[in-house]
Image: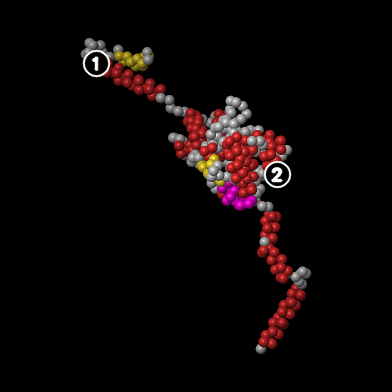
């Protein structure tokens, strides 16, 4: 009898006629055993090759997209996407969704509606935007990904009440700056004179600051390609003075411009966040609280009101003027209609309008009879002039 054993377990057997070793019956049995052993080993190898399940493919899509975001996007954007994807996969577990193909428009609506009810329309719309981006990335870069329109796109954005951004008055900014000392004052002045984002200032190194030429280099990760965007700005003389002083006065000679000074373990390290810094300064100054971004908006407001939209766009580092326009409108920087009408009225044309109307419009409204009599007198005068000329 011929037998095939794999890992101590018999997987096949067959009865052959008895014969001498090396004879035809013996060779036939051996050939059969070799053939069956190959089949058994191939089957075992196939069984050991794990085919990803639909759920594993779903999770791999999320993990790969977040890895892509980490490589190409700003830290704050990555944190936002992580939060959105974590919430989405928690929803998938609760709904028993294990396959991208089973994610319908109705399921997408249920997830986003729950977010809107719990945290508001703004949070739901932000999740919708990020999930659409993740789906589109999967369509382009994940094998066997459903080539269909993202189900989240089929859900309409939720209505939200857009509040006006708070831009502090100049006197409040001055009061806060008066409470800042040494490095903190230079930090606020850098924010104000450059209109930079806080992360751009946190990342500043002395290679980015050319004091002799009065230039400063700011970088961000806002490009869709993942590449860093760089812009050079001229520095105000007061900012040059402040940074020159700080470069000499700083307690640690490190590459980063601004550094942590609160304890020995982090001494000299660049900032990643300053959570309560502005709240503390505003409390000391006795003003309505505002943050780093409000200083950026204040700088943009001053640039806009003085030099127009293009100046604000250059200061804020926006690639498109439409982005700056959104900021300007949300901050209420466009003049109200009353101011527009006042400006039109105070122009040379507006000043002339009064005289033009007085000439054409009598103080008392004309009656139909008076209007006819006036026309009769005018015609009579014209006829008399024609007669005298002949």
Q: Position of residue 191 (x, y in %)?
A: 61, 41
**Residue in view at x 60 percent, y 37 percent:** 246
Q: Is residue 208 left or right of residue 119?
A: left
Where disc 2 sits, the SS reads helix
Indicate which disc residue 27 carries.
1
State the residue in front, 196 or 11.
196
Image quadrant assignment for residue 218? top right
Q: Which residue is mark 2?
A: 171
User: Can residue 125 be seen here?
Assistant: no
Drawn side of residue 338 relative to residue 316, left or right: right
Secondary structure beneath dot 1 equals: helix
In the drawing, does residue 151 fall left or right of residue 380? left
Taking the spot 25% from the left edge, 17% from the top edge, the residue there is: 28
Q: Is any atom of residue 268 visible in this view? A: yes
- Residue, x 62% and y 41% (percent of image)? 189
Numbered range of the magenta stretch: 304-315
């Amino acid at each position: 009898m011929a037998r095939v054993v794999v890992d101590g377990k018999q997987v096949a057997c067959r009865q052959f006629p008895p014969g001498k070793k090396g004879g035809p019956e013996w060779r036939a049995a051996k050939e059969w055993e070799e053939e069956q052993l190959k089949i058994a080993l191939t089957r075992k190898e196939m069984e050991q090759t794990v085919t990803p399940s639909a759920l594993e493919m779903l999770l791999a899509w999320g993990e790969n997209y977040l890895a892509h975001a980490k490589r190409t996007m700003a830290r704050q954007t990555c944190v936002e996407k992580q939060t959105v994807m974590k919430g989405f996969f928690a929803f998938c577990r609760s709904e028993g969704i294990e396959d991208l193909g089973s994610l319908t428009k109705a399921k997408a609506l249920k997830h986003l509606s729950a977010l809107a009810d719990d945290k508001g329309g703004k949070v739901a719309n932000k999740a919708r935007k990020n999930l659409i981006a993740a789906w589109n990335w999967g369509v382009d870069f994940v094998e066997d990904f459903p080539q269909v329109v993202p189900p989240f796109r089929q859900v309409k954005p939720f209505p939200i009440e857009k509040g006006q951004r708070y831009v502090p008055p100049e006197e409040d900014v001055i009061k806060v700056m008066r409470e800042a000392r040494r490095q903190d004052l230079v930090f606020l002045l850098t924010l104000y004179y450059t209109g930079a984002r806080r992360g751009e200032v946190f990342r500043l190194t002395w290679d980015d600051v050319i004091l002799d030429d009065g230039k400063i280099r700011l970088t961000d990760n806002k490009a869709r390609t993942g590449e860093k965007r760089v812009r050079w700005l001229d520095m105000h003389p007061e900012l040059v003075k402040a940074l020159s002083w700080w470069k000499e006065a700083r307690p640690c000679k490190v590459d980063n411009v601004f550094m942590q000074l609160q304890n020995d373990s982090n001494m000299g390290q660049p900032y990643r966040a300053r959570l309560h810094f502005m709240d503390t300064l505003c409390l000391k100054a006795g003003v309505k609280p505002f943050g780093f971004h409000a200083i950026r908006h204040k700088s943009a407001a001053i640039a806009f009101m003085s030099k127009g939209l293009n100046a604000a766009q250059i200061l804020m580092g926006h690639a498109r003027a439409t982005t700056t326009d959104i900021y300007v409108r949300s901050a209420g920087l466009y003049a109200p209609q009353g101011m527009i009408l006042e400006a039109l009225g105070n122009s040379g044309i507006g000043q002339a309008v009064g005289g033009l109307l007085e000439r054409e419009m009598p103080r008392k409204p004309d009656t139909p009879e008076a209007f006819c009599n006036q026309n009769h007198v005018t015609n009579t005068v014209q006829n008399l002039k024609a007669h005298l000329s002949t």
